[in-house]
Image (cartoon, rainbow, N blue to C red):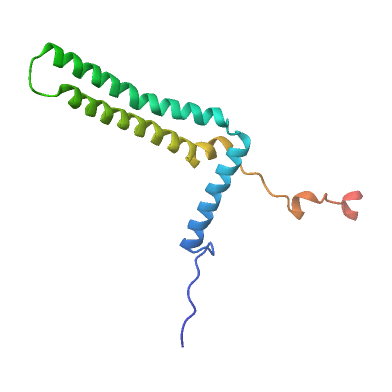
């Protein structure tokens, strides 16, 4: 005879636990998004500006340093090109780091769930909602 499979005590398989965790995470993100409205177009333009300047400024500083080195040192090396690429690389790293931190902050359920969780309340049951009536012995 084949034995029936043993069920877990909490009647949830690991797959259903994973799915319920994903659903809870998405619900928390949606609730957070409803409470904290998206700033709109200006937020997007500001984000593009910050990312753009974080790339452009190191690149321009690298070009300026390269031009200054070429003017002060008479050498056959192309310092402008070298420092342009170095500034561009540094700017892209700064922008990537900043955007990844913002993405992590927006999609972190631990931050939103900690702020939104409250102590669990006891669900009303028949025992704690129906008032007790006095028996005939208690009335005497």
Instruction: Residue 1 in the image: state x and y as whole percent.
Output: 46, 88
Q: How many marks?
A: 0
Viewer-closest of 98 and 17: 98
Say whether residue 36 is left or right of residue 95: right
Furthest-top residue in view? 72
Say whether residue 134 is left or right of residue 20: right
Say which residue appears at 55% left-offset and 35% top-offset: 115
Viewer-closest of 122 and 127: 122
Instruction: Residue 46 in the image: state x and y as whole percent.
Output: 48, 26
Say which residue appears at 50% left-offset and 70% top-offset: 7
Furthest-left residue in view? 75
Quarter of the figure with residue 89: top left
Instruction: Residue 43 in the image: state x and y as whole percent.
Output: 53, 29
Say whether residue 27 is left or right of residue 71: right
Q: Is residue 26 above or below residue 15?
A: above
Say whether residue 17 is left or right of residue 88: right
Residue 118 shows in the view:
no
Viewer-closest of 83 and 6: 83
Say which residue appears at 19% left-offset and 22% top-offset: 80
Q: Is residue 40 above or below residue 13?
A: above
Viewer-closest of 54 and 125: 54
Residue 16 shows in the view:
yes
Say which residue appears at 24% left-offset and 20% top-offset: 63
Quarter of the figure with residue 77: top left
Q: Is residue 5 above or below residue 117?
A: below
Instruction: Residue 92 in the image: state x and y as whole percent.
Output: 31, 32
């Amino acid at each position: 005879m084949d034995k029936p499979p043993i069920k877990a005590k909490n009647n949830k398989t690991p797959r259903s636990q994973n799915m319920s965790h994903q659903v809870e995470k998405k619900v928390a993100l949606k609730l957070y998004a409803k409470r904290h409205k998206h700033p709109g177009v200006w937020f997007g333009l500001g984000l593009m500006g910050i990312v753009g300047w974080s790339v452009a400024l190191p690149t321009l500083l690298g070009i300026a340093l390269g031009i200054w080195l070429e003017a002060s040192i008479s050498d056959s090396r192309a310092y402008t090109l070298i420092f342009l690429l170095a500034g561009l690389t540094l700017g892209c790293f700064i922008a990537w780091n900043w955007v990844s931190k913002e993405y992590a902050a927006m999609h972190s359920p631990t931050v939103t769930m900690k702020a939104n969780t409250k102590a669990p309340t006891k669900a009303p049951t028949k025992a704690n909602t129906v008032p007790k009536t006095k028996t005939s012995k208690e009335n005497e």
